[in-house]
Amino acid sequence: MTTFPQHNASDEEWTDWRWQMRHRVNDEATLARYIRITDGERHAIKATRGIFRWTITPYYASLMDAYDPQCPVRQHVVPQAPEVEPDIVGVVDPLDEVGHSPVKNLVHNYPDKVAFCVTSECAVYCRYCLRKRMVGDADYMMRKDELRDALGYIRETPAIRDVLLTGGDPLVFSDANIDWLLGELRAIPHVEVVRIGSRLPVVNPMRITPELCAVLQKHHPVWLNTHFNHPKELTPEASGAAARLADAGVPVGNQSVLLAGINDDAATLKALCEGLVGLRVRPYYLYHAQLIGGTAHLRTPIEKGMDLMREIRGHTSGFAVPAYVLDTPDGKVPLTRDYVLGRSGDHVVMRTTRGTLWAEPNPLGDYQPLTSVPEIPMPPEARTVPTGAPTFVHAEAV
């Protein structure tokens, strides 16, 4: 019988998704079983305490390089020293999701779609998370009556045809709860599409059990978008999870985030996208990293992302090329010259799909872009996120 020395786990335990959740790594002593912790990481762990916790499944921790602090998996989940350095923004909700929520945790920002944040719990806490304000926070957990309130809003709003179950991560729910939730949505005549956003196929692929797949199959059409960021995450375990979903008739897409030092070069991005296609996972979006305070070290110039798209398009299968987008309070904006109007100093100005103007704080630094973006004056009607005193306090205490 194989054992896994970090936790002295048997095969049966290691492959049990619930065991993975119960034994998540969230203290220095346990983390030291997986990596040689640097002084910078120790400092960041202490400095971010009370701001944004960290937690890692044993499986995902086992993918980290023990000696290289630049390991892409390690940078995803272990607090890093630059997180506590000054940043240009300190916003906690850059997309104004709370302002677009008619009831708790239900974001209605598109006429026909809602993002239903059914839980605030995740298997891991990614350091660049869009929802740092809520992840791991008990105040954002959903009681059954609160879930029913959100379902009631969907039921009473016939324009809603597409429901995204997100969070947190919906797949931390039991099979029975997922079955109940999908059944409630399927009973609403105007809900045509149900989507699930989950990182568990990447960070806890053991969760994709035959029993879960049977539940999803029961409520088709169900789509699932997951979140691979680097080829190192394309493991045999993740491949098995993707195969089980595909075999159950669940179309799987992938939403990566462009992250400096992790996947912001053409070779890595191309290897990731081609590897995903091999797993029957469609590269869907490449998100520009959001303006969450304390993540400046992970954000890239928008022109760099545009250059990457230019470098890989035509050099791999067309369906292996994701759409590069920025999420804004006025919806997702494709980061192409059709929408990007120009640069105004440290802001990139773009026209949204709703016809409004958005100015994204995005210093170019010393990057020399290949893609030409003209310098323009800031349009007075352009909206942007508030900036102020530099701060690393990027989330409410959780």
Image: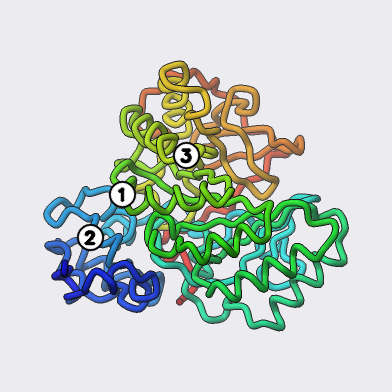
Give residue 220's position: percent from left, percent from top: 68, 54
- Which residue is at 31% across, 49% downward? 236
Query: Residue 209 appears at what percent x and percent y?
Result: 45, 63
SS of the residue under disc 2: loop
Residue drawn at (46%, 26%) of the image: 309
What's the amino acid at mark 2? Ser
Mark identifier at residue 62 = 2
Q: Earlier in the sequence, mark 2 or mark 1?
A: 2
Write the residue at 39% across / 65% down: 124
The residue labelled by disc 1 is 236
The vertical placement of 191 against 176, above or below, is above
Between 230 and 290, the residue placed more toward the observer is 230
Q: State the image coordinates of residue 104 (x, y, percent, origin top left).
A: 69, 73
Along the viewing direction, whichever of 178 and 342 lies nearer the viewer: 178
Callout 3 crowding tier (Cα within 10 Å): few <14, some 14–19, many ≥20: some
The span from disc 2 to disc 3 (Cα, nearest Å) is: 24 Å
Figure disc tally = 3
Q: How far is the residue under mark 1 from the one under mark 3?
A: 13 Å
The answer to whether residue 156 is left or right of residue 389 is: right
Q: Where's residue 260, x and y in %?
A: 35, 41
Q: Residues within 10 Å of mark 2 (few under 14, many from 20)?
A: some
Let me know if residue 178 appears in the view.
yes
Q: Quadrant of residue 264?
A: top left
Residue 280 marker: 3
Q: Residues within 10 Å of mark 1 (few under 14, many from 20)?
A: few
Q: Is residue 39 visible?
A: no
Name the amino acid type tagged 3: Arg
Per the image, label 1 sits on a secondary structure element best described as helix
Quadrant where the image shows the N terminus: bottom left
Horizontally, is 139 left or right of 111 in the view?
Answer: left
